[in-house]
Image: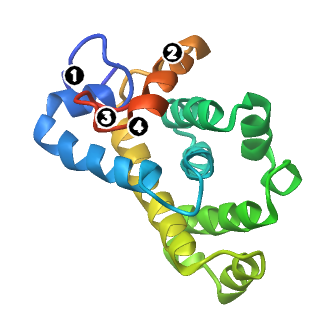
Amino acid sequence: MPHISLPDGLPGIRGPMAFRPETAKPLNELAELLLRSDNSLSRGDRELIATYVSSLNACTFCWRSHAAVAACHLGDETLVDSAIASPEHAGISEKLKALLAVAARVQLSGRMVTPEDIARARSFGATDIEIHDTVLIAAAFCMFNRYVDGLAAVTPTDPAAYRDRAALTAERGYSMGQPPV
């Protein structure tokens, strides 16, 4: 049960965003910029970073939502699940493995990111913008995760609820005039 009176029928972050639409707009714009703008990292890779951080934070709504969006972009739900469970053993690029390791460090504390983490990412071809965006996605999703869980927002248990919304989000984005998944 949510800690405050949120609108009925809006799960996860959608409830708090509907409660305070003036904060929803910049948060949606941030998600749109980080996850969908032009970038050398694919939308699927960026969604996977958001998913991984959300899973490390145990924010079920966010990790399920973004895992479903990542699967839409990557076309492979099993790959997304394996990357969340064990990035180092998943069938993803070495660069993405290194960036997920950086994201995991940020999830613990920004000060946990080491020169060795960055050197590893660079050794697999990560650019400054990719490293920057990985750190910012990880930091932003720590905030989003705490927003959802800090208000005890409703979290659906049916995986189909995430898949249905994910297809719309993958197609239309986070600034489609509605709070994101």
> Closer to the N terminus: mark 1 or mark 2?
1
Residue occupying image coordinates x 79% and y 31%: 78
> Closer to the N terminus: mark 4 or mark 1?
1
> Closer to the N terminus: mark 3 or mark 1?
1
Cα–Cα gap, marks 4 and 3 = 5 Å
Q: Is residue 10 placed above or below 126 in the rendered structure?
A: above
**Residue under pointer 4:** 149
- Amino acid under disc 2: Asp
Cα–Cα gap, marks 1 and 2 = 22 Å
Estimate the x, y position of residue 181 in percent, counting from the top left.
Answer: 41, 29
Residue occupying image coordinates x 28% and y 31%: 176
Q: Is residue 84 left or right of residue 108?
A: right
- Amino acid under disc 3: Leu
Secondary structure under the numbered disc 3 in the rendered image:
loop
Query: Badge 3: how crowded within 10 Å, few (<14), some, or many (20+)?
Result: some
Estimate the x, y position of residue 95 in percent, counting from the top left.
Answer: 74, 67
**Residue under pointer 1:** 6
Query: Badge 2: how crowded within 10 Å, few (<14), some, or many (20+)?
Result: few
Q: Which mark is residue 151?
A: 3
Mark 1 or mark 2, whichever is nearer to me: 2
Determine if residue 3 is in view.
Answer: no
**Residue under pointer 2:** 164
Q: Are marks 2 and 4 in contact (CB under 8 Å)?
A: no
- Amino acid under disc 4: Asp
Cα–Cα gap, marks 2 and 3 = 24 Å
> Closer to the N terminus: mark 2 or mark 3?
3
Cα–Cα gap, marks 3 and 1 = 9 Å
Q: Quadrant of residue 178?
A: top left
Q: Residue furthest right?
A: 89
> Closer to the N terminus: mark 2 or mark 4?
4
Q: Are marks 2 and 3 in contact (CB under 8 Å)?
A: no
